[in-house]
C-alpha cells in the first residue's frame, strides 16, 4: 500500500492537539511504562510489534486497526499492547519521542505518525527529526521535552533491549507481528483475516 502524502494539518486526528495540556503527568506516564488500550483484564491480549517507519505497519494502522478498535477493543474483548520494534534509526527516534508523551496521548500520536509517514520519515530533503518535532509539537510536547527524549540514551538502550528480548522470545523477524494469547502471527492483514485469529 502507498500512503498518500498529506499536509501537517491533516496528520493529527481531530481534537488531538486541542487535548494537549489538559491532564498532568501520572505515575504511569514513565517512558518505560506499558502502552496499551482496552480493558486491562480482557480475556484476549494482543501484542503488536511495529516499526514507525514500516509501510505495512502504517497500512494496518490506517486500514485495519480502526475496525479492530471499534469491534474488539472498545467492546472489552481485547487488550491491545504496543511494542516498539524499530527497524531503523529514524523509527527508534520516533519511538523514543512517542514514549515521552502521556500514556493517553500515545496511541493517537503513533497513528498520526503513521498517517504522515511519507512526510516525516521519507520526505525528500527533509530532516526526519525536525519533521518529527512538528507532529510532537502539535501533540502538545514542548521543545525541551522533545530534546530530552532525543537525548535519553537509557530509554534508547531499553527499547533496543526489549526488541532483542521480543526477538528471542517470540521469534519476531518482521513487522507488523502480533502475539495473541501467546501465539505469534506475522504480516499486514485486513480486518476479516485478523478477526479469525481472535479466540472466541
Image (cartoon, grey):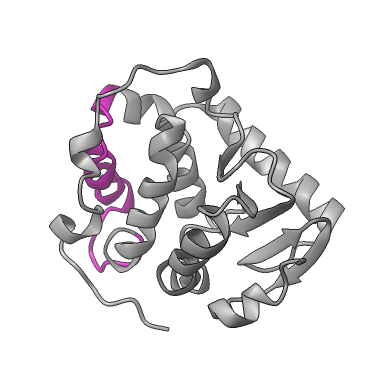
Residue 164 drawn at (x, y percent): 76, 48
State the quadrant of the C terminus: bottom right
Relative to 24, 15 lies left or right: left
Q: As drawn, is 155 to the left or to the right of 146?
A: right
Q: Nearer the viewer, residue 4 or 61?
A: 61
Question: Does residue 107 belong to the magenta stretch?
Answer: no
Tell me what residue is drawn at x 31 percent, y 68 percent. Answer: 118
110 w.r.t. 144: above or below: below
Q: Is residue 171 left or right of residue 109?
A: right
Left or right, 44 with reference to 74: right
Say which residue appears at 48% left-offset and 72% top-offset: 64
Name the residue located 25 percent from the left edge and 68 percent from the top edge.
Answer: 124
What residue sits 28% from the left and 31% below the top? 141
Q: Nearer the viewer, residue 65 or 142?
A: 65
In which image quadrant can residue 150 be found?
Answer: top left
* Picture quadrant of residue 62: bottom left
Q: Quadrant of the N terminus?
A: bottom left
Q: Position of residue 171 (x, y in %)?
A: 82, 62
Above or below: residue 141 compared with residue 65: above
Residue 40 at x, y = what percent? 64, 38
Q: Which residues are magenta?
A: 121-144
- The x, y position of residue 32, in whole percent, is 59, 29
Amino acid at each position: 500500500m502507498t500512503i498518500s502524502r498529506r499536509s501537517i494539518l491533516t496528520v493529527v486526528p481531530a481534537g488531538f492537539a486541542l487535548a494537549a495540556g489538559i491532564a498532568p503527568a501520572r505515575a504511569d506516564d514513565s517512558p518505560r511504562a506499558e502502552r496499551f488500550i482496552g480493558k486491562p483484564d480482557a480475556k484476549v491480549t494482543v501484542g503488536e510489534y511495529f516499526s514507525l517507519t514500516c509501510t505495512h505497519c502504517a497500512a494496518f494502522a490506517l486500514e485495519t486497526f480502526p475496525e479492530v478498535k471499534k469491534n474488539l477493543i472498545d467492546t472489552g474483548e481485547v487488550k491491545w499492547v504496543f511494542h516498539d520494534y524499530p527497524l531503523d534509526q529514524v523509527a527508534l527516534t520516533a519511538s523514543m519521542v512517542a514514549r515521552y508523551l502521556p500514556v493517553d496521548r500515545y496511541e493517537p500520536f503513533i497513528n498520526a505518525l503513521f498517517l504522515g509517514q511519507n512526510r516525516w520519515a521519507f520526505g525528500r530533503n527533509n530532516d526526519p527529526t525536525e519533521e518529527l518535532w512538528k507532529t510532537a509539537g502539535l501533540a502538545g510536547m514542548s521543545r525541551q521535552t522533545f530534546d530530552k527524549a532525543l537525548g535519553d540514551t537509557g530509554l534508547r538502550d531499553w527499547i533496543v533491549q526489549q526488541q532483542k528480548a521480543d526477538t528471542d522470545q517470540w521469534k519476531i523477524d518482521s513487522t507488523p507481528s502480533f502475539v495473541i494469547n501467546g501465539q505469534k502471527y506475522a504480516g499486514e492483514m485486513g480486518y476479516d483475516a485478523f478477526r479469525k485469529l481472535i479466540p472466541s
